[in-house]
Image (tube, rainbow, N blue to C red):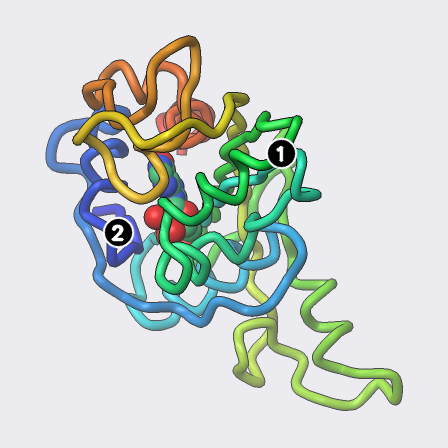
Amino acid sequence: MLRYVTTNPGKVREAERYLPDGSVERLDFDYTEIQADGLGPIAARGAREAYRHADAPVLVDDAGLFVEGLDGFPGPYSSYVEDTLGIERVHEIAADLDDRRAAFRCVLGYCDGEGFAASPDPVDRGDRDAAAAAGPDGEGDGGSDGTDAEPLPVKLFEGYVPGRIVAPRGDGGFGYDPIFEHDGETFAEMDTDRKNAVSHRGRALAKFAEWYADR
Ligand code: IMP
């Protein structure tokens, strides 16, 4: 059984559409969200931590909203910004911009404790985290999940969807969905199937599901 690691049931509803019935369940585990300027290292480290916690195959999903006119803000800080400023405020800030284009990005990190054969999707072996943990003197823990253990390989799958920031519309979805418009509809106006067909998570999940079917 695959564990989809998230505190957000909305993400699991989207993931279930891509995976065989009964093959995935939610693991409500709050992994450490390291400070990083990209989603990949956050997902990779979260996947290692969750795998060690669950001792079973895990999929961690890290996503964010990147507003062009704000140099990609809130990006990896999307969760913090949603909790503190709120999505209405993000819309108000974007409303003052000439360029309201934005994108959602999602990175899925898969870890089952094993290595992976080469394929087009990137594998994070913890080199970056281990180097950062080692510091300039080369000291520190070798692990990339805060443990002394060897970094575990994590397979990464990425998805991206362009759109623009608009005044909130719709009552479906979650998070920033009401203020993100793609092809004339906000994500909160779409049902799960329609959102999946175009969304960052749907695109990453489609890649993952194809690869996972052979695993
Ligand atoms: P995280 O990946 O759960 O840390 O999500 C980061 C932030 O992006 C949170 O504020 C989420 O609510 C938001 N977010 C992630 N995915 C989506 C989505 O598909 N739609 C809207 N907001 C999202």
Q: Residue furthest top?
A: 183
In this rendering, would 195 be left or right of 164? left
Q: Amino acid at mark 1?
A: Leu
Asked whether disc 2 touches disc 1, contact meaning CB atoms under 8 Å apart, the reply is: no
Q: Secondary structure at mark 1?
A: loop
Residue 112 seen in this snapshot: no
Q: Residue 127, percent across and down?
A: 73, 63
Residue at x 77% of width, y 72% of height: 131
Count of residue discs: 2
Q: Is residue 119 above or below residue 2?
A: above
Which quadrant holds residue 150? bottom right
Q: Residue 54, percent across and down?
A: 28, 66
Q: Nearer the viewer, residue 92 or 42?
A: 92
Q: Nearer the viewer, residue 92 or 21?
A: 92
Number of other residues with Cα within 10 Å of mark 2, as a class: few under 14, some 14 to 19, many 20 or more: many
* Residue 97 - label: 1
Q: Amino acid at mark 2?
A: Arg
Residue 152 seen in this snapshot: yes
Q: CA distance from mark 2 to mark 1?
A: 40 Å
Q: Residue furthest left?
A: 22
Q: Residue 35, percent across and down?
A: 60, 68
Q: Secondary structure at mark 2?
A: strand
Q: Which residue is mark 2?
A: 3
* Residue 177 - label: none
Residue at x 42% of width, y 27% of height: 166
Label whose residue precedes the other's in the sequence (2 or 1): 2
Residue at x 22% of width, y 62% of height: 28
Residue at x 27% of width, y 14% of height: 194
In this rendering, would 34 be left or right of 181? right
